[in-house]
Amino acid sequence: MIVICLVNTYDKLKKHEIHLRSIARAAPLCYAFNMHLALLDFPFWKKPEEVAEEVAEYTTIGNGGKYLLGLAEEGKLHLVEKIPAHFGVSIATTSKPDPKKNMDLELLKSLNSATFLIGLGRKGLPSNILKSARYHLDITQQGVSLETCTAIGAIAMLLALRVVKRWRK
């Protein structure tokens, strides 16, 4: 199981447009590359179907939310308060990886299941998530900070080119 997990680093009490846009942009990538989409700390929704319906009404991205609705129907859209063990090893995406936790691409290819934690917002992932993640991944391998949706696309493409074929079996 490969999971892209968006971590809400914005207001936990109020939905923002950035929440809807980020989810709408991540869904087609998850759908296309056979990944799950998890939303961590999004308390304004109770069920994945609520997310899918609201985002589908909001956006034209992903064929009007078609792919997000598909993820929900297939059980690949998750609302979580913490990362479940069955989601595999947790990997914090950051342009400033801890050298002790830094993951190289060879190690990435060897994993059977993983959750890629991606923070929404300018501050990136909170320190508690960075500390709890088993690994850190700088997708650029050069310390270049990427916008959230750019990072999601880069991770999806890397997995498609190097890893996902093995995980789809």
Image (cartoon, rainbow, N blue to C red):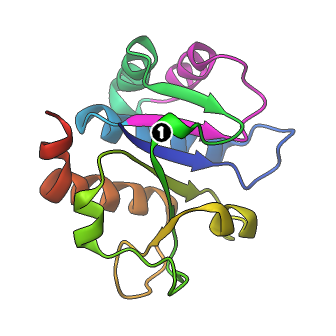
Regarding residue 124, the answer to whether it shows in the image is no
Residue visible at 42% across and 42% down?
A: 3
- Relative horizontal placement of residue 169, taking residue 5 as reference (left or right): left
Q: Is residue 49 magenta?
A: yes
Mark 1: which amino acid? Answer: Phe
| Extent of the magenta region | 36-59
- Relative horizontal placement of residue 120, taking residue 12 as reference (left or right): left
Residue visible at 44% across and 87% down?
A: 143
Q: Which residue is mark 1?
A: 87
Residue visible at 34% across and 78% down?
A: 140
Regarding residue 99, the answer to whether it shows in the image is yes
Percent position of residue 60, x then y: 42, 29
Q: Is residue 51 magenta?
A: yes
Answer few, some or many: residues within 10 Å of disc 1's Cα (few below 14, many 20 plus, some between 14 and 19).
Answer: some
Q: Relative to 108, is 78 above or below?
A: above
Image quadrant in which the N terminus is located:
top left
- Relative horizontal placement of residue 135, taking residue 17 as reference (left or right): left
Tag count: 1
The residue nearer to you, when weighing 52 against 113, is 113
